[in-house]
Image: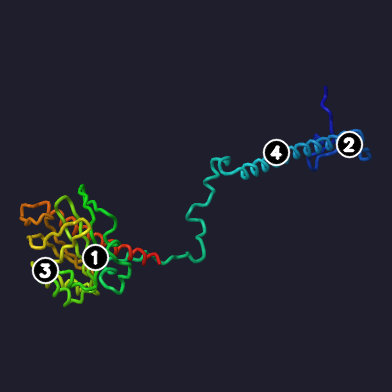
Amino acid sequence: MRPMSFGQGGPSQQWDPWKPNSQQPWSGGGADRSPDWAALADASEARAKRRRLLFIGGGALATVAIGTAVAVAVVSANGGNQASPGASSQLPGASDLPSPTGTVPSFAPTSAPPPLDPNDFIASAVKDKAPLSPDILFPGTQLTMGETVYKKGPTADTENCASAAKATLPKALTDNACTRLIRVTYTKDDVAVTVGVAVFDTQAQAAKARQQADKKSIIKSLSGGGVKDFCSGAVCRSTTNTVGRYAYFTLAGFTDGKNVTEKDKVVFATGDDLQEFTFRQIRRRGEAQASAAANE
């Protein structure tokens, strides 16, 4: 078969509706040839079909893009635990965060006031205002020190301090303006001890009275109420001490009139117990007043 001729100038290009400048097909030869309308219709239908395919494909791509955007939005809304592995690297570091603004509140250091000193309240009559009597200073009907129980006997209270003292003690009390002397007697078997508490206006007066006291400075024993007279003529053991504005004394001996010797440990122990108890009672007096003042 002989090849088809397309006229002068060699074979012409096949017409492609999608290729620019391509020749359109004509039904006949010559200059007055008319267009092949069937071919043109087929080409137009082909173009419309391809355009519809493109629209359909573009819509599918748009749907995928929207779906991806929604998925990313849902992941972001659900928190960091569902984010992609690279999401944490996109978060700002601590150094990138803005610093807090405004004035940081400051507080002045506070401290509790120092506790009040009980000694201040028993050092002077100006502060030592709590009630005072033999039963307040020596309450109850007996006293227990360790395993020893002492029975409380008679009590006495006088503003004439010298009248309740003997030997050289009256002068020491008077010279330093003793204002009151309280006495009480305790017994244990055949041993008795009288405690005397002399009250002064100041701590300095009490300390000076103690300095002026000597071995002969003793208080008068207090008997009665079932307690026999003791230490009237026999040798007894005595002590002298001070705390605050108080000077306190003890006189211990036998109720049967025997002299006390260094071997009579029970007498010494009785005197020591009673002077220790007296010190504690005066100290508690100061503590109670200090506590009350602190709570005002």
Which amino acid lies under the numbered mark 3 shown in the image of this protein?
A: Ser
Q: Position of residue 54 (x, y in %)?
A: 77, 38
Q: How is the image coloured?
A: rainbow
Residue 183 shows in this picture: yes
Query: Would you say 142 lies left or right of 295 here?
Result: left
Q: Which secondary structure, mark 2?
A: helix
Q: How many marks?
A: 4
- 278 up-or-down from 126: above or below: above
Q: Quick check: 142 above or below 214? A: above
Q: Quadrant of the N terminus?
A: top right
* Front position in the image: 145 or 294: 145
Residue type (three-letter) at the residue carrying disc 2 = Leu
Measuring 76% from the left and 39% from the top, which residue is drawn there?
A: 59
Q: Earlier in the sequence, mark 1 or mark 4?
A: 4
SS under mark 1: strand
Nearest the viewer among 151 and 200 is 151
Mark 2 or mark 4, which is nearer to you? 4
Q: Which residue is mark 1?
A: 156
Disc 3, SS: loop
Q: Residue at x 92, y 36 (%)?
A: 37
Residue drawn at point x = 10 percent, y = 70 percent? 167
Other residues around mark 1 within 10 Å, as few (<14) / some (14–19) / many (≥20)? some
Q: Nearer the viewer, residue 154 or 58?
A: 154
Mark 3 crowdedness (10 Å alpha carbons): few <14, some 14-19, many ≥20: many
Q: Quadrant of residue 85?
A: top right
Q: CA distance from mark 2 to mark 4?
A: 37 Å
Of the residues shown, which amino acid type is indicated by label 4?
A: Val
Mark 1 or 2, nearer chain start: 2
Q: Name the N-terminal-most of marks 1 and 3.
A: 1
**Residue matched to label 2:** 40
